[in-house]
Image: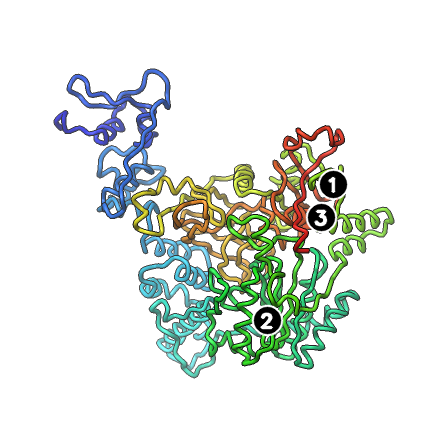
Amino acid sequence: MAANSVTQLVAYFNANQDLTLGELARDTLYEDFPSKFVWKTDGGVKRWEKRQRGSGCEAGRMPTVHPSSGDLFYLRLLLKNKKGATSFQDLRTIRDVESGEVIRVCPTFKAMCVALDLCEDDKQWEDTLEEAIHMRRPRAIRDLFTNICLNCNPTDPRALLEKYKEHMQDDFLLKRQEAVTQTEDEHERLAHNDLLRALNLNFQDHDKTNASFDIDMPEDIGQQDVIVDTSEIDPDAEEYYNDNYEKMNEEQSKIFDQINSCVERDVGGLFNIDAPGGSGKTFLSNVLLSCVRKDLQIAISSAMSGIAATMMKLGTTYHRRFGVPIPCHQDSTSMIKLDSKEAIAIKNARVIIIDEVSMMEYKLLEMMDRFLKTLMGRGDFMGGKVVVLLHDFRQILPVVPGGGRTAITSASVIHSYLWPHFTTLRLTKNMRVERMIRMNADEQRVKKLKNYAKWLLEIGEGTVDTVCDGIIEVPDQMVCQGKYELEQNVYDNFLDNYDDPNYLMRQAIMSGTNDTIRQCNYEMIEKLPGEAVISKSIDTCVEEKDQGTYDQEFLNKINASGIAPHRLILKKGACIILIKNLNVKDGHCNGTRYIVEEVTQRLIRARKLSGGANAEILIPRIPMISKDTSFPVPFKRLQFPVLGAYYLTFNRAQGQSLDKAGLYLPQSVFSHGHLYVGFSRCGDPDNVFVYADQKEFENIRHMLEDGKTYTRNVVYKEVL
């Protein structure tokens, strides 16, 4: 090659072949070359030479290239991610990781990017399903296919189904083959129809049908179905009611009787139940739901969060159940059609129960009121239905992006025109603490637990003793002197129990910011044995016009709330939390914690820590849209919808019950309810541990007692 035709890129390829430059060249990305090598053009020879003095003194950067530039865009993407290429062809070559042998040469740079999961293509969903075949049973593959269709926008779902249908309908075929009088062709046809029906039921849980994805609808074949839609039927309702009715305490029984009287007389009624954390509101609601359902009548249970919905029998999220549009405005209407099966179920419901209402904006409740009035054809509030709102305003309030105290409190459901028309009922006994009391007859222990229950309410209501400006003293027995001591107390004997779901389910550490949580979870996963799998996201701007301004490298650096990071580190045995609702009916929702049983670049096989039916799930990489308003344009990140779960934010911890709880406070909490949520996750003060950095209080040290630990409590009393 002529000297004047040698570009910096060609010289980079040459350097990777040069034995004198050694492993240094082959272990350096093209854009980082200037930090370790210097570009020489003297003597008529253009080349890279190793720097003689210093390192990292030059920062390399490749020009931004718009995706519409075709192969040039994909060439740049490969150079930013693949080291050691010796030619343009080598850049398109896939090799065995261990032997280095050539597996195949991709025809284009784009094809190579797709093979390395650096950009999106339907082939990634084929590869994901291919891996799933070797991991799990047909039902899990059907659920995975459903999630791919619903969340990943494949270009040809029909072709994907055709290719993998045999693996999705194996169990149906076995069931159909029990009918020995039918031919094998009939077995195949019926089994395929069963598959179409199962997929359609899955899609209907998300207001879709097979037709939404150009997939055939199931036939009405007049044969006994092997699948039954039981979404409104609880076969265990009578047994649950009989087993638990007598277990209600006096407060719970009184509230039950008052609400159930309205249900039985069919007279309607609006109730809101103030229920501090641990007071048994979920237990009470499940007894009430079972009482209605045991007579094969419909009772609707929903919650503002997925994790709270899974704790209610047949629970669904409020947004899903009532068709809440996102965003929901002052005059928004439900997306549910009045003649749909969802609307008919709501119309026939004898009672509607909604949990975590403290997180609800008033606009959502008012949308439901308009919907029920129209559905029921009545002008009464909530269409004359029996509606029960469960809440604890000491906990997390509505999330208002970028909003301060005034915006958050103004958005609260208590400012709805409906709120004064709800009768307020109260649960006051902390059942978590009561359980601890029943387990311990020791008088001093009982006194300690009762004092703790009282102190928790004072934290939540902002009446606890303060030094000044919300600063409170942390009880001495809870104090840890550092992060290491905190982890040792909460996760004792960690490496002996890291893969035990029962161990992991009982404990967690909470903190205030996503960055802190992310780093701490990374350090915990690092401690686990075994090889790490590093999943790197594919990031793109939602609007094509923005793609030339903000390249993938720029987007990779953004850690937005609500989505996984660009670089996600996982291992077999790691504890993770789902950050997106995938299947609320089966309990696979935002806030559910799992243990990883297998992980690849395309798929996670995980099991719920709580176990139970349908505990396993296959989790693909899913496109997630960032709603972070601090970034000027929306962008899409293709990544596993999970995070590490040894440390949780206070928002994600809400609804969790723990035997051991830790609070990691490198700085004090900054929002209403955080401290209350953290302390109230555990009913035993001897199993709550706190590390609170004291640097923020140095300027008022003269006001604080030596040897004591302090932190700030934030309470918006105007919502209580």
The amino acid type found where label 3 is placed reads Gly
User: Residue 462 got which mark?
Assistant: 3
Position of 583 relative to 75 (above/below): below
Residue sitting at the far bottom: 222
For disc 1, the neighbor class at 10 Å (few under 14, some 14 to 19, many from 20) is some
SS category of the residue bearing label 2: strand
Q: Quadrant of the C terminus?
A: bottom right
- Tags 1 and 3 in contact by the CB under 8 Å rule? no
Q: Is 644 left, or right, of 217 in this rendering?
A: right
Dot 1: what SS?
Answer: loop
Give the residue number, with chain letter if any, for mark 1: 466
- Looking at the picture, how far across and down is residue 314, in whole percent? 58, 68
Query: Residue 57's x, y, as percent?
Result: 36, 22
- The mark nearer the N terminus, 2 or 3, is 2
Pick the quarter of the image with the N terminus.
Answer: top left
Q: Amino acid at mark 1?
A: Thr
Residue beneath label 2, please? 300
Q: Does any portion of residue 313 appear in the rendered image?
A: no
For marks 1 and 2, give the CA distance.
43 Å
- The total number of labels drawn is 3
Q: Position of residue 593 (x, y in %)?
A: 56, 52
Please state which amino acid type lies under the numbered disc 2.
Answer: Ile
